[in-house]
Amino acid sequence: MDLLEAMRTTGTCRRYDTRDVPDAVLYRAFEAARFGPQGGNRQAVRWVVVRDPELRERLQELYLRHWDPYHRSITEGQVRVGGSTGMLTAADQFARTLAAVPALVVVCARIEDLQVTDVDTGRVSVVGGASIYPLVQNLCLALRDQGVATAVTTLLCREEAAVRALLGIADDHLTAATLAIGYPARGFPTKLRRLPVEEVAYADRFGSPLFDGPLPGAPGGPDRSTR
């Protein structure tokens, strides 16, 4: 499929049907994902594909340990999220049926191969993810190209020790995310809600818009013709 179409329709899928994802589909996706940019080409990322029902049940139990209080804090108004009530309901259903997703992929990375240049900045450290998450997005896009949906969640990282023990992950590897993978029960989104370019792209100074409005010919712009 067209790359830009894949990028614009690879949303978070929270409802899956029961079909298994064939090995050939997974192989093609991992084969493409490995070309994501990564610091020093150190290739730190490893993938653990969890299909065993008992292991998926255990991962769901660990997930719910943290989802339940987080969900409660949202419904009680202590935490604000940008999504709608319907999205929150879908996220809750996703959490409670996680074990039913055909495959869960735990994303691991060898710690010594991550270039964490922001560790002493006095803020949340994120730079190490630059060698991880581009590959995760590559995987999502490669699966979307084959009609397979995904959801990326990091909540299980709070149970890293338990997940490491459950799946035999080496001590010198961290867990960076878990992907739910399967065929979507309701198809793919046709329109994802995102902030317009004019609100997120700045010129020379933070907050100074790079564009005054959509450019002619751009998706959503004033002129979609090719003339």
Image (tube, rainbow, N blue to C red):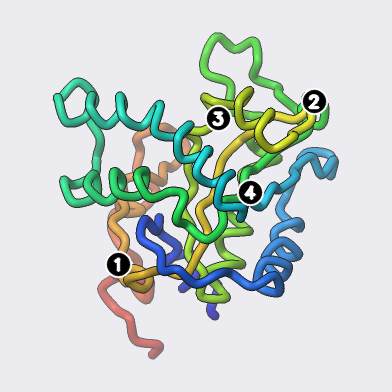
Mark 4 belongs to which amino acid?
Answer: Pro
| Residue that label 4 marks | 134
Q: Nearer the viewer, mark 3 or mark 4?
A: 3
User: Which residue has dot 2 on it?
Assistant: 172
Residue type, numbered disc 1 = Lys
Residues at marks 2 and 4 touching, judged by CB atoms closer than 8 Å: no
Mark whose residue sits in front, 3 or 1:
3
* Viewer can see residue 4: no
Label 1: which residue? 191
**SS for dot 1:** loop
Give the CA distance from mark 3 to mark 4: 18 Å
- Tag shown at residue 157: 3
Q: In whole angstroms, how far apart are the C-alphas of marks 2 and 1?
A: 41 Å
Q: Quadrant of residue 138?
A: bottom right
Residue 89 image offset from top left, x and y in percent? 22, 47
Left or right relative to 208: residue 131:
right
**Which residue lies at the image location 63% right of the left edge and 29% below the top edge?**
127
131 to 192, vertically: above or below: above
